[in-house]
Image (cartoon, rainbow, N blue to C red):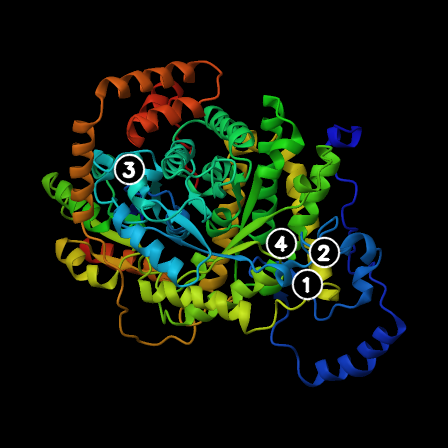
């Protein structure tokens, strides 16, 4: 049976335009054989949730460097919950103070990746996580 | 413009010297044979090849053989004289130290006003305002898209009322202020000028800088509102206004900083920034401005990254390229047009979240490169910025770093101490040549706006950024504390900004809208909208709207209605 490709949506929520990290992750996951969709900049949680539903993704990767993570992440998780998309893994990467991580995880963020994370670590996390779910 | 200028081709590119053309002296060949060879046989070098952080190859040794055809009297010259390789002033930092200008801003205008006054009491010599994302994008603090972002990355400024608080008890006549604002630069600058007027400061005498560099927003930082054409019109409007009314203000800070932070190489940073500069000059001339009238008001802003000598070479090459460009391409006569002045900031992207105290060392080395490269002003990053905006404690160490360089290291005692180094001069030539190649490629694409529309610089940067990431992932480039020498550490105390800032901003906006004259606001916004449809300079219209306390969001919306908004083609 041919292996189904892992589908990932990389999204930049909020007003921030710093997209270096998002682009690198998109490319690294693609190079690792995943199907990657990049939303482009300035996506509202609503736009991200509906793109995730339309594209039927296994994973959403959010890139946030603006300090708005405590507002944007819960909004997205709530929308996914209401759409019945509880099995989508949501990851966050960016400038995230350590003190904020427990609350983000409690809200349903699967993992928070800080600056300096190797791309292989993220690839590995996505593979392990999606393998557990399928 | 001269005939040479029209072709856009520089006449004095540094000669290309391939290793095979290199003619070492007899003494150098003897050294290779007698000393080097046995050493390499006994103990090989640590790597087969050495490269800069940008991937530029670095040879084992540089000698006079690398500088064949290089004329120290012509190519190096003297400080304060063309082509300014050694710096734009005769005495450089012996005469006057660089301006220590720490970028700061968070929370409300009150919060940032306090930080500014603190920094000034600590010996900082110029102000630099960081605005929050809603302000940078031309939204008021109470706009739905501002939710979660108010006061987070900088200070929230939604109207002249906020700007008045930001500069409360700070005399604009005596302090120079740099404002990192781009798409809404004309509006924020108008607010600053209105505060200056209220304080009784003379516009002819006040000085400072608005970043106002929209091209690098499309290329790298992505905080744009309108499409390129109307955005460039706004930029040229500010040039024209500045030339007439604020002759000591810098109407733009043409920025490589963000290009580099987005992952470019040093050569790309240099080339794209200077090609942006050429684009602004082209547009200014098309408006009918005189080259020697407005070009002296253009300033530059470069990154100070980690690869020490590559950075120094970059600043030296920048001055030579700008000199040649202004003289040969644009026929500038005034030395003030052709001497490139620049601000520098240490590399935010080099800061690590891991073992953050190491960032003090990184920043000090980067700052040293900027000083040795002849910077006019400098911002040093704080050790905690891979986590959050800096605390007062961290920001003070960053400022002290500059003061130690200025007063303890001794590097300011002589002008361009590295001038004449075989390595630095060769690298300067190579970086310059690499930049000219890019500039010619962008000329061939029809200029920078055309190149941006084809995603050319965006794609080049994304490629370089990914290459570097792979090098780090594969440990070809070591980052201490990240991919080597890893250790567990206790979390830092960092600056927290809560949502009370947004609530305070929303309340003050509500009050402002209730107290101002609505009729006057509508009249001024209608006049602006009307002027935007024509070709008049928009600065006077924006200024009048600002003075009527129209908000930033309202003014930007008035122009959105006429100009539309821009969306980029996302590339990955």
- Is disc 1 in contact with disc 2, using a CB cutoff of under 8 Å? yes
Tell which circle, 1 or 2, labels the residue nearer the N-terminal end.
Answer: 2
Q: CA distance from mark 4 to mark 1?
A: 14 Å
Q: Position of residue B295 (x, y in %)?
A: 62, 36
Which label lies toward us, 2 or 3? 2
Tell which circle, 4 or 1, labels the residue nearer the N-terminal end.
Answer: 4
Q: Which residue is mark 4?
A: B315
Residue A41 higher or lower than B453, as above or below: below
Badge 1: residue crowd in 10 Å (few <14, some 14–19, many ≥20): many
Chain to which mark 1 belongs: B
Q: CA distance from mark 4 to mark 2?
A: 14 Å
Q: Which residue is mark 1?
A: B415
Q: Position of residue A29 (x, y in %)?
A: 37, 51
Chain to which mark 2 belongs: B
Residue B69 falls left or right of residue B181: right
Badge 3: residue crowd in 10 Å (few <14, some 14–19, many ≥20): some
Q: Which residue is mark 2?
A: B79
Residue B114 higher or lower than B286, as above or below: below
């Amino acid at each position: 049976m041919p292996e189904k490709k892992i589908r990932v949506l990389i999204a930049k929520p909020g007003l921030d335009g710093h997209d270096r990290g998002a682009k690198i992750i998109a490319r690294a996951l693609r190079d690792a054989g995943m199907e990657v969709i990049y939303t482009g900049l300035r996506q509202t949680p609503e736009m991200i949730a509906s793109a995730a539903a339309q594209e039927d993704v296994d994973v959403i990767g959010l890139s946030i460097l603006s300090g708005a993570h405590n507002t944007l992440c819960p909004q997205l998780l709530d929308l996914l919950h209401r759409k019945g998309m509880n099995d989508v893994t949501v990851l966050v990467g960016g400038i995230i103070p350590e003190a904020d991580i427990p609350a983000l995880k409690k809200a349903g963020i699967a993992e928070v990746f800080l600056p300096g994370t190797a791309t292989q670590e993220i690839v590995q996390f996505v593979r392990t996580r999606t393998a557990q779910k399928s | 413009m001269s005939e040479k200028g029209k072709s856009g081709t520089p006449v004095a590119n540094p000669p290309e010297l391939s290793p095979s053309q290199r003619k070492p002296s007899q003494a150098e060949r003897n050294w290779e044979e007698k000393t080097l060879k046995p050493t390499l046989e006994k103990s090989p070098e640590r790597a087969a090849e050495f490269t800069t952080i940008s991937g530029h190859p670095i040879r084992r040794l540089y000698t006079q053989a690398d500088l064949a055809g290089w004329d120290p009297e012509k190519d190096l010259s003297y400080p304060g004289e063309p082509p300014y390789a050694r710096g734009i002033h005769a005495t450089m930092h012996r005469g006057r130290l660089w301006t220590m200008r720490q970028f700061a801003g968070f929370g409300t205008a009150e919060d940032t006003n306090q930080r500014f006054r603190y920094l000034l009491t600590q010996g900082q010599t110029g102000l630099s305002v960081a605005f929050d994302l809603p302000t940078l994008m031309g939204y008021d603090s109470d706009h739905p898209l501002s939710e979660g972002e108010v006061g987070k990355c900088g200070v929230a400024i939604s109207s002249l009322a906020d700007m008045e608080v930001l500069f409360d008890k700070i005399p604009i006549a005596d302090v120079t202020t740099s404002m990192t604002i781009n798409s809404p630069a004309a509006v924020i600058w108008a607010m600053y000028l209105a505060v200056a007027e209220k304080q009784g400061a003379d516009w002819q005498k006040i000085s400072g800088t608005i970043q106002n560099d929209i091209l690098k927003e499309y290329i790298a930082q992505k905080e744009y509102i309108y499409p390129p054409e109307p955005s460039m019109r706004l930029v040229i409007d500010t040039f024209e206004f500045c030339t007439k009314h604020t002759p000591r203000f810098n109407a733009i800070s043409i920025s490589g900083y963000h290009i580099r932070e987005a992952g470019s190489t040093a050569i790309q940073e240099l080339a794209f920034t200077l090609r942006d500069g050429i684009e602004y000059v082209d547009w200014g001339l098309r408006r009918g401005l005189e080259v020697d009238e407005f070009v002296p008001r253009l300033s530059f802003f470069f990154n100070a990254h980690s690869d020490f000598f590559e950075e120094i070479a970059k600043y030296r090459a920048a001055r030579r390229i700008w000199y040649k460009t202004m003289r040969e391409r644009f026929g500038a006569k005034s030395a003030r047009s052709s001497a490139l002045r620049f601000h520098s900031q240490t590399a935010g992207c080099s800061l690590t979240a891991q073992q953050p105290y190491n960032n003090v060392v990184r920043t000090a080395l980067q700052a040293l490169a900027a000083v040795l490269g002849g910077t006019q002003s400098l911002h040093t990053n704080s050790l905690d910025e891979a986590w959050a905006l800096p605390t007062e404690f961290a920001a003070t160490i960053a400022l002290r770093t500059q003061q130690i360089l200025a007063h303890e290291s001794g590097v300011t005692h002589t002008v361009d101490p590295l001038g004449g180094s075989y390595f630095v001069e060769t690298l300067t030539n190579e970086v310059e040549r690499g930049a000219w190649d890019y500039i010619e490629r962008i000329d061939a694409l029809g200029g920078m706006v055309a190149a941006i529309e084809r995603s050319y610089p965006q794609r080049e940067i994304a490629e370089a950024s990914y290459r570097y990431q792979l090098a780090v992932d594969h440990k070809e480039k070591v980052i201490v504390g990240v991919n080597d020498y890893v250790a567990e550490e206790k979390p830092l105390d960092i600056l927290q900004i809560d949502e009370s800032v947004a609530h305070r901003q929303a309340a003050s906006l509500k009050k402002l809208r209730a107290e101002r004259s609505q009729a006057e606001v509508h009249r001024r916004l209608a006049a602006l909208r009307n002027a935007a449809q024509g070709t008049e300079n928009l600065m006077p219209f924006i200024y009048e709207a600002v003075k009527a306390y129209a908000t930033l969001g309202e003014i930007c919306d008035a122009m959105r209605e006429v100009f539309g908004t821009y969306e980029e083609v996302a590339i990955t």
